Amino acid sequence: MPSQFEEKENRVAYLNIEVPAEEFKSSLEKAYQKSKRYFQVPGFRKGKAPYQIVVNHYGEGILYDDAIEYAFPAAYENALKEHDLRPYSEPRLNLVSISGADGLVLEARFALKPEVKLGEYEGIVAYRPNVEVSEEEIDAKIKEAQDKVARQLPVTDRTLEKGDTVTIDYIGKKDDIAFEGGTAEDFDLKLGSNTFIPGFEDGIVGKNVGDEFDLTLNFPEEYHADDLAGEEVVFSVVVKAATFTQVPEIDDDFVKDVSESSDTVEEYRAEIRQELEKAAAEQADRLYERNIVEQIAENSEIIMSDFMVEDDVEREIQHQSQQFEMYGLRYEDFLSYSGQTLASVRQQMLPNSRKNLDLAYTLDALDEKLALEVTDEEVEAMIVELAERSEISVEDYKESYLEANEDSRDRLEHQVRSEKLLDLLREWSVATDVDPHAHDHEHVHDEHCDHDHDDEADEEE
């Protein structure tokens, strides 16, 4: 099956693919078989007209779309093998010619692997934020630990307060008639959450469990239901139960309950500080590594097809759509509500997608150039680390991951090599705590100030 290949600008492959008439005729027959039950030809029962009669009646073109779907995949794969090509994007198809008599000719355009001409990659100066942990951050982590071991206890000997969770029945009436959405039983409401219209929760504060009472309130003027907006209503409320959250005191007993290594509050705060500093240092290292690679990418020449960027954006949009579908929502509806369109979202995503691809292929180019070796011991150490993260034994990890996936060993080696590469880049680079983005903001501010001074000078003149 003949084909011609040509590489054009920005690493785009042009592959001219011909499907001979005899082979394409087979695809037309398959297209006919797929849809023949829908064809209605005078003199024949629906779906019973022979191939040639259908073609004579409707025209051969009615089969072309399906026929291309049958013919293209095998022809494309054969052409890729013929020219030893690996596509880095989905193919974009142009129809050159098509007929049962002459066959099919298609032009497939797709991205080839990006070409990276590395620039300077040693001695890079890149931003790494200082690692600082505040007392407020430590307090927040302790508060999280308190909340985890807090208990819900019934309110028994006092009136209700903000922060309590009450279980209530209520009926809302306007002009003595219950209105839609204004009635519920066994409804759990945290007082102070501002879940209800103003005055409802405040009207429950100070009451007791078991109380029955009416609340006369007004809906806000801007309420979404026109028939209730600004209207006076009466809620009849029954408080059936209430609970409050008992948070433990921060003392040595609390510490022994929540920590495996500390016995006193002082030791616990030091433990938390160490954990936060470690996490902050890891985050700072990740940012430092990205900034290093960004600098190397800027020093380099990267030739990449737009097709790769477009496909990357489409994958992200598909991922986001699936996330919304999990909650029974349509992504398009969300965009509409927020005043966006798929086209505008694509445009917004393009720069970040290109940047991420630039960084990924810059790292690939460095990986190829440096050709770092990976030892069996390093791979085993990675397996131990991943098993610990997954909280399973090394043997179970090997059985579930390594033995179940043929290419898993290669992936692990690549992961180890990538980490060694990043370690090496950090070693070769110089960290600075001067945030270049902060400087940009100051520069923009200075420009505004300059313009202001200029305006003042103009006015004085």
Image: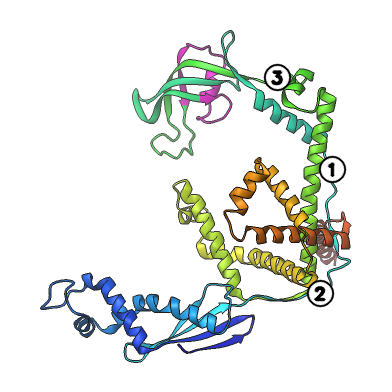
Percent position of residue 9, x then y: 63, 84
Label 1 packing within 10 angstroms: few (<14), some (14-19), many (20+): few
Q: Report if residue 193 lies within the magenta region.
A: yes
Q: Is residue 363 above or below residue 229?
A: below
User: Which disc is residue 119 wearing?
Assistant: 2
Residue 398 rendering spot, x and y as whole percentages: 64, 49
The residue type indicated by label 1 comes to Glu
Alpha carbon separation for disc pair 1 and 2: 34 Å
**Of marks 1 and 3, which one's residue comes earlier in the chain?**
1
Q: Secondary structure at mark 3?
A: loop
What element does badge 1 sit on?
loop
Q: Is residue 356 visible?
A: yes
Q: Of the numbered discs in the image, which one, if any, rests on residue 248?
A: 3
Q: Secondary structure at mark 2?
A: loop
Amino acid of disc 2? Gly
Relative to 220, 139 lies left or right: right
Labelled disc at residue 132: 1
10 Å crowding of disc 3: few (<14), some (14-19), many (20+): some
Q: Which residues are magenta?
A: 189-217
The answer to whether 142 is drawn above or below residue 22 in the figure is above
User: On the picture, is 452 further left or further right than 411?
Assistant: right
Quarter of the picture holding the N terminus: bottom left
